[in-house]
Image: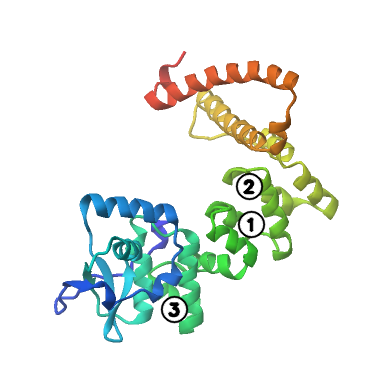
Amino acid sequence: MHSEMHGFNLAPTMTDAIIHKRIKLEELDWSLSSLRITRPGDLGRMRQSLERSGQLNPIVVRPFDERFQILDGFKRHCVAIDLGWESLEARILDISLPEGKAAMLSYNRSGRSLLDYDEAMVIYNLKQEHALDQVAISRLTGYSRSWVCRRLALIEKLDPALQDALRMGVINNSQARALVQLPRGNQQEVMRCITEWHLTSRDSARLVEKYLESGNQKQQQYLLDHPLEVIEQAGANQEIFDIRLSHHGNRLLKSIELLHIQQGIFISLCGQHMTGQLGETETWILEEKIERLRKGAGKVQKIINYKTWKDAE
């Protein structure tokens, strides 16, 4: 990702001064918070941090209509209000509104607090509100045109229902990137399949790939009715080989990849409501197998945790 970023330079010039100031909460404008997704879990973690350690980093603002518009620090501002604080330490940047929106991407990139859809909302806003084309947005933000194009696609090519699902956490960013490859008319039904079968990001991408390769509606419907079977076949037929590895190294690679596939299928099946409807005999039979799986999983976890895979028995 870093190779796609030219760098939006927010460092002050020799004639500029970095202004830090405590600003009263009532002087802060949070109108740009509409370009961020509020996640309750993030707010909870921010509250714990502020209560435990206080404000460790200043929020970032720009002068705006005799107030200060927040560019970075929406969670800190929200929690500070809830805690009854009177002010926050702020870094003031004298920049335009479009530059301020570009700064939202820059300040949050290092900590990766922005997800793809948050970035997409900022990019789409620059296009719609400021009439900037992809070249201008690329120059302003410091990201490549292809990066800008991919973010715009999450807004322009993703079905509104899927956008809502992404905002609410029903699907994740990786799944959205896969689904956006489909025509809008097919996105919702494939998303329902992904959520109903609790598919992982990787399996979701495989499902979308196979869906796009399907020649007719009958084949597509079969995929949606039997996604785990299709994913398993796709993994089994996939050539797993890395020229950099020895013969034994490639055997290890293939076993890791196949184990990952089966793990995803197992998790998906366990999440199905039908698992809770198994009879007493079925449960008894499967519990014996689950116990064997538990012991094996414990050994795998030990190998992973202690990095003993090179000399594992």
- Badge 2 vs badge 3, beta-carbon distance below 8 Å: no
Measured Cα–Cα span from mark 1 to mark 2: 8 Å
Q: Which mark is residue 136?
A: 3
Judged from the image, the secondary structure of the residue bearing numbered disc 2 is helix
**Kind of residue at disc 1:** Leu
Using a 10 Å C-alpha cutoff, classify the residue at mark 2 as few (fewer than 14 neighbours), some (14 to 19) or many (20 or more). Answer: many
- Badge 1 vs badge 2, beta-carbon distance below 8 Å: yes
User: Which residue occupies 56% across, 65% down?
Assistant: 154
Q: Is residue 309 above or below residue 112?
A: above
- Residue 47 image point, x, y percent: 32, 54
Judged from the image, the secondary structure of the residue bearing numbered disc 1 is helix
Residue that numbered label 2 is attached to: 204
Residue that numbered label 1 is attached to: 179
Q: Is residue 106 above or below residue 32?
A: above
Between discs 3 and 1, the one toward the N terminus: 3
User: Which residue occupies 65% across, 45% down?
Assistant: 206
Between discs 1 and 2, the one toward the N terminus: 1
State the scheme by which the image is colored: rainbow
- Residue 32 image point, x, y percent: 40, 74
Measured Cα–Cα span from mark 3 to mark 1: 27 Å
